[in-house]
Amino acid sequence: MSDPTGHMPEREALAAEYVLGTLPLEERLTAEALIEGDPGFAAMVADWQNRLAPLNDAYAEVPPPADMLDRIEARLFPAPERLRRTGWIWGALTGAALAVLALVTLLPPPVPLTATLTGEGQALAVAASFDAGKGELTVVRAAGPAAGPGRDYELWLIPAGEAPVSIGLVRDSELKIPVADLPAGTTLAITLEPEGGSPTGIATGPLLVAAVIGGA
Amino acid sequence: MEAGDPIADLIAATARSDRAAFRALYSAASAKLFGVALRILRDRSEAEDAVQEVFTRVWLNARRFDAGRGRGMTWLIAIARNHAIDRLRARPAGIEAAGEDETARLADAAPGPEAQSVARGEARRIADCFDLLEPARAEAVRGAYLNGLSYLDLSRRHGVPVNTIRSWLRRGLQKLKECLEA
């Protein structure tokens, strides 16, 4: 892989530096996009991870807090009955159910906020990222099946304590929606609706996945 | 291929939405991943958030793990390091972790790879290859990897421009690669 002058090609150097961890954020994000989109680059990264893996022995084991597994499971697997009992989405999201919806980890601005919408027993996972600088929310189905014929996944934005607002349909391509602000406490949720979305403007189908925007 | 990778088996079962396997994976790996997050972030509460996010990603992305490409623990640690370093880089400039608490210092106290796993051929091989680098360069590579130092951090620490540090470390990585593949 090396050229006669003993230098790595630029792309391999980027893969190596990504694994080393020294890059500034913008270049790390570039590398992460390449890992997603370019199997050759992803393989170089995997090779470098293996080369440097023996260094991992120097990381000490430190027991995490005793309740951490519970917190992770509460986030990944919200209690099912509570979500199913009510038909209307806001009802489904109030009270106890709200507390167990996925929390969100976030990088402070100007880095985009990212959230993963998940739900109990749901293969579906939806990735959302909000770029406050551009005022743009990007949403894409990250895992799980498509909605199926005659149906759509409808995305709702629910400001804390307010009624849900439909902001789009999540189909196969990335959905970009202008959103002025996404304050902590806002909920993003997906329901299964007839093709084209809820005819009434109020969620009619089951709540599948959701995430509450955490404090930055 | 090395035989026996129980962590890889647990990741494969997790990919089939096996929650018991996910719990077992948590038991087996959480202390190591918390140690990684703590050492890089040097802030206990942020390290806790990071580990929660890491296990969320593990659950969602387990099917992307390829046992033919590396060991299970290597994959998990890569996820933890990448997430912790991304968080570190996203901190507003000039903000160092306030609380270098007891636990964060503890995370530094582990023995180096040479001391801990002389028996493992791969660890010995990389230790030998590190020995071929100038000590300062080897230390910079190791410090960057383990602590999540950026080129900017290294440039301040060594009092040389970022680009100088960058090409100097790239040459170090290139030499390591040649040595490991020799």
Image (cartoon, rainbow, N blue to C red):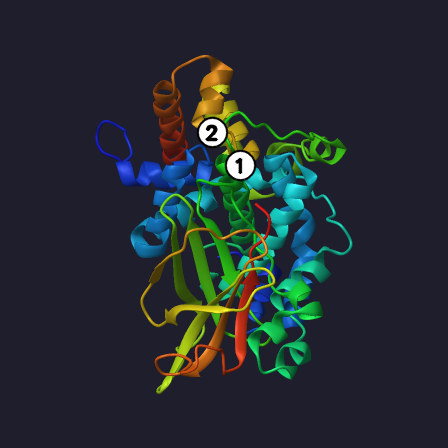
Near mark 2 (Cα within 10 A), the count class, few <14, some 14-19 or many ≥20, is many
| Mark 2 or 1, nearer chain start | 1
- Residue at image x 34%, y 24%? B167
Q: Is residue B6 left or right of residue B151?
A: right
Q: Position of residue B56 (x, y in %)?
A: 57, 59
Q: Position of residue A203 (x, y in %)?
A: 49, 78
Query: Which label was assigned to residue A68?
Result: none
The amino acid pointed to by label 2 is Ser
The amino acid pointed to by label 1 is Leu
Residue beneath disc 1: B88
Viewer-nearest of discs 2 and 1 = 1
Picture quadrant of residue B52:
bottom right
Residue beneath disc 2: B150
Q: Chain of mark 1?
A: B
Does the residue at mark 2 contact the one at mark 1 (Cβ under 8 Å)?
Answer: yes
Q: B71 or B19: which is nearer to us? A: B19
Q: Is residue A65 left or right of residue B144?
A: right
Q: Position of residue B48 (x, y in %)?
A: 67, 47
Please determine if labels 2 and 1 lie on a single subunit: yes
Examine the rendered structure and indicate whether residue A8 appears above or below residue A165: above
Q: B101 or B147: which is nearer to us? A: B101
Q: Position of residue A37 (x, y in %)?
A: 31, 56
- Residue at image x 63%, y 39%? A59
Examine the rendered structure and indicate whether residue A52 appears above or below residue A186: above
Q: Is residue A157 visible?
A: yes
Q: Quadrant of the C terminus of chain A?
A: top right
Q: Quadrant of the N terminus of chain A?
A: top left
Picture quadrant of residue B103:
top right
Q: Is residue A138 left or right of residue A106?
A: left
Toward the bottom, the furthest residue is A150
